[in-house]
Amino acid sequence: MINIFIMLIFFLPVCAAAEKVVFVSVEKDIPPNMYQEDGELKGIYIDIIRQACKKLDIDPDFRLYPWKRCVKYVKDGRAEAIFPPIRTEKRAEFLYFPSEPMADKKIVVFALKEDHIKIERLADLKGKLVGVNDGYSYGSEFDSFPGLKKDYSRNIDMQVKKLVHHRMDVAVAVEAPFRFFSKKSGFSRKVEVVYTVSEESSYVAFSKTMGEKGKLLSEKFGLILKQLKKEGVVRKIRDDYLK
């Protein structure tokens, strides 16, 4: 019965051939997920959305604004889709969320492979110099955890270099950007994840101002994402940026 439902969804039309759909997101560079290089928009999120849109015969029109304006535009219908929001009850009031997330955002602890560090809980970080980004929140549990000695960096690139040059014992960071800058600096084979602090899913969500068309597009987008993951397409996209 479920397979029949999936087949029906795929055969129902969503858009006219190669119809443009406006996807809005924050205008800040967030490598490797989304950034501009030589005037070209690229990144893991961009490539995943393009692959999904190709299968749906959609021409994605990416537009970047401050986040509050992005939210306003999907609320009033000036944009059809937004990425990469976390699903909340409040956002679900004006957005259709697909059944499949686009990506998972992991905050993890990195260490040098050669140091053979084992971390099983946050308390194991006590007695170690823990590298963080100045002004960044890693979630209430980590931020408020007592007794941690922290070293502050201006950005992730600096954090990577400090770890590799033994100026800190471990680094706490969002996994994808840290791996991206590790690869860029030639250090990707020197570091490893030793603990996951938290994990949450990021989505491409669709405006409810589209009505049933938006609901159907959301359902089809979720199924396409699941298919792309199963076929290894999403993994290859990630590996191209991170390994």
Image (tube, rainbow, N blue to C red):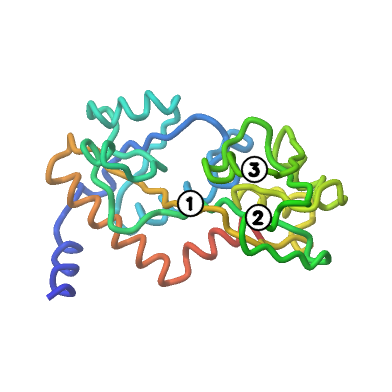
Q: Residue 113: which quarter of the image?
A: bottom right
Cα distance between the residues tagged 1 and 2? 38 Å
- Provide the secondary structure element on which disc 2 rests: helix
The foreground one among 5 and 55 is 5
Q: At which x and y percent is residue 162? A: 82, 45
Mark closest to the chain's N terminus, 1 or 2: 1
The foreground one among 188 and 197 is 197
Q: Residues within 10 Å of mark 3 (few under 14, many from 20)?
A: few
**Residue with the mark numbered 3:** 146
- Provide the secondary structure element on which disc 1 rests: helix
Cα distance between the residues tagged 1 and 3? 40 Å
Q: At which x and y percent is residue 243? A: 67, 61
| The label number, if any, that marks residue 47 in the structure image | 1
Residue 5 horizontal side relative to residue 140, left or right: left
Amino acid type at mark 1: Asp
Residue 16 horizontal side relative to residue 108, left or right: left
Q: Residue 236: which quarter of the image?
A: bottom right
Q: Residue at x 79, y 60 (%)?
A: 112
Residue 166 horizontal side relative to residue 79, left or right: right
Which of the image's four quarters has the N terminus? bottom left
